Image (tube, coloured by chain):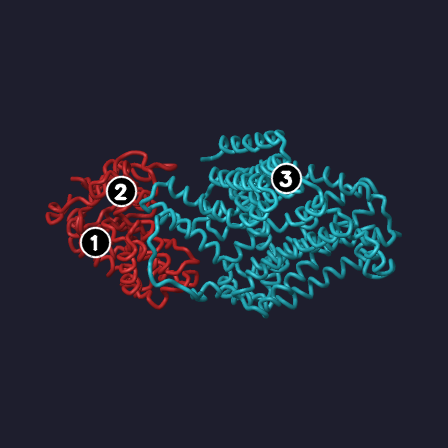
Amino acid sequence: MHSPAAAHRPIALALRGLSKRFDRPAVDALDLTVYGGEFYALVGPNGAGKTTTLRMVAGLLRPDAGSITIDGIDALADSVAAKQITAWLSDEPMIYDKLTPFEYLEFVAGLWRIESKPAEARACELIGWLGLAPHAHERCEGFSRGMRQKVALAGALVHDPKLIILDEPLTGLDAGSARLVKNVLLERVRAGGTVIMTTHILEVAERMADRIGVIASGRLIAEGTLEELHRKTGKTAASLEDTFLTLVAEPAALPAAAE
Amino acid sequence: MSRPDTLTWLAGHELRLGWRDWVALMTAGHRNRARTVTVALIVFAAFMHVFAYWIVAGYADANVASDTATLVGVTGTLVLSWSLLLSQAMESVTRAFYARSDLDLILTSPVSARKVFAVRMSRIAAASVTIAVLLAAPFINVLAMRGGGRWLAAYGVVAAMGAVATAAALALTIALFRMVGAKRTRLIAQIVAAVIGAAFVIGLQVAAIFSSGSISRFAALQSDWMLAHAPDTGSAFWWPAHAVLGDLRALTAVVLLGFAVLGIAIAGFSRRFGEHALAAAGVSNTVVRQRRWRLAFRRRSAARVLRQKEWTLLARDPWLISQTLMQILYLLPPALLLWITFRDATGSYVVLIPVVVMAAGQLAGGLAWLSISGEDAPDLVASAPIAAGRILQAKIEAVIGMIALVFAPIVAVLAFDSLFAAVVAALGILTAAASATLIQICFRTQARRSQFRRRQTSSRIATFAEAFSSIAWAATSALAAAGTWIALGPALIAIGILAGVRMISPR
């Protein structure tokens, strides 16, 4: 199910029958479609399979079954081409303590084989946007969590990815940093980029996402715009939190997401 | 169970944490390995007793009324052991200062922080004493079996040494805090600890080499000069030695003195411990500005970017440099001995080359772990549009590049005198380094670079394989430098080790 406006857009990400099992099934025959220029939020309870799904999309985990298509590229057959147009940002900013933000961005641009001149211009722009300019030549080892997350976000954007995959990017950020990160992501979407993000902060999903997918036990139990989700639960005046809790509590009683 | 907020209750808490930390260290976090580890420890203890028998059985007849030579020998051994204990204690004290795990909890609780830190320091002392006693046990047991129960008094001396070592470590570390501040103390304390641990052994060996051409530390201790300048046998200086030899009066004095020194240190430093621990906790928030930076990105390939990153991270981490280069420090005495022994003989390189090759293998193992397992941003690298094999290749190139940089001057000097020796050395260095790197690839894990100190515990098989492969390639190089085909023997052993590693590798 998807909104009519999204239907004519190109598909940025398509997951079909995606499965991954650890001790138990983490992701179970998941079908998901995200359209170009869309902000898609994936919500669900702890252990629902959100992070596992996104790690498979980012090429960090190999699925047991199913397919991943990013902008028409079979990501399992040609992972290098798929990675070239994607960016991954996890909740724990993984950066190098002994590098400065400027050096970190140069490193990332090198990994993505971006020409030095445009990469440098883009890096300077991002450093400015994210308020990192006064710290551009300080080593990251003394940075707060918020600043580290900003550096990691700059790294995710420096190669101008078509698809940005974020796992709880606002965890541990103060209000100012969170606002900044949200604005940068919305700016990316306005510029034609696609964002898929997991979050526990339902307000963020409610305010930012074009569509929301609710995942539980590795399956997509509901999907749609906020209004569509409300209609699905019959709680038209409720908040996303109420709707989410209803969906997660009674997934079997609801119509399938693909309907 | 004791009442909360009492010293015994806090000690019980510290004891439980200490025990779990030790078990995790021994089993590398895998609780199902407990039985294997127990068996390995029993085998190790049996081996140590055999080793101790070989080393000290001949000294079991030494008695209390000993001559100066015996007292010098015993005291020298005690000082040597104490320097190692001090090194270990400094490591523990530094780690305790900089571990902020429960600092906030302690300092915000209504429990007296001074009491908590006093217990914490006691835990460090208990760990030092236990380690000292465990390491000394095989030697004391063998001496007691061969020379009678009086040797058991040595346990008391060793315990007192552990106590004094902890007191000295506390004093030294706190002095460093006051002199150089919290930011630099960790690095300096760890380097000082490593140098203290190595300096006495290396110093004695170097002195012995120059005085008698022997690598034995006892040669220097038994020299005429040393015996002539030693205090009278009745001096209090020899109390620890007398106590080891079974003098109960000396033993009582040494034990009381040792634990009194520790008690005073704990009482005196427990307040400062909290202050410095707080200062250490704030170190991570300090800003390090790069003195020199570029204003433009450089055009480089992805592989070069990866190699450059590895070199930059290493160059900016003096602690890691000191930890990796420390392995080479221990190879200096044998190198010096070999040089002195064979400097006038033709073919002296036959004995110099294996030392260099061995050092290259050991150094490469450490660097390979840092580069391959110690990746601080694994997701970033793994999500980059580069084939996994190419990433690994770039990291291997970074390791081999660093080895080449360190050992190229040695090979160049060799080439001036003997091109053949230089070629053999270069091949040996590269082969040993490549083997150590291959072993690290086979046993690679995901870890933070800061966990480097514990890398050996994550895979003991990898550690032993790395050491044996380096030894085998060193032997190969020595025999190759001598121009004999027997060199193929140890080479085949080294290849066998690598094949074995590949077979049992979890990857």
- Circles 1 and 2 on the same subunit: yes
Q: Amino acid at mark 1?
A: Ala
Q: Residue B238: which numbered mark, if any? A: none
Label 1 resides on the chain identified as A
Q: Chain of mark 3?
A: B
Q: Position of residue B117 (x, y in %)?
A: 59, 63
Q: Which mark is residue B41?
A: 3
* Circle number at residue A209: 1
The foreground one among B49 and B388 is: B388
Residue A39, position as x, y percentages in the image? 21, 52
Q: Earlier in the sequence, mark 1 or mark 2?
A: 2
Is there any visible trace of residue B31 in the rendered image? Answer: no
Tell me: residue B390, above or below residue B112: above
Residue occupying image coordinates x 16% and y 56%: A237
Kindly identify the amino acid type of the residue bearing the numbered disc 2.
Ala
Q: Secondary structure at mark 1?
A: loop
The residues tagged by marks 3 and 1 sit, at their Cα atoms, a distance apart of: 58 Å
Label annotation for residue A81: 2
Are the residues flagged by discs 2 and 3 from a single subunit?
A: no
Residue B387 in which image quadrant: top left
Q: Colour of chain B?
A: cyan
Secondary element under disc 2, as helix, strand or loop, is: helix
Which of the pair B343/B433 is nearer the observer? Answer: B343
- Give the spatial CA distance, label 1 vs label 2: 27 Å
Q: Residues within 10 Å of mark 3 (few under 14, many from 20)?
A: few
Q: Secondary structure at mark 3?
A: helix
What residue appears at the point 37 percent right and 62 percent down from the top-left corner?
A: B294
> Dots 1 and 2: beta carbons under 8 Å?
no
* Residue B104 placement (x, y as % from top left): 49, 63
Q: Colour of chain A?
A: red
Residue A174's place in the image compared with B159, above or below, is below
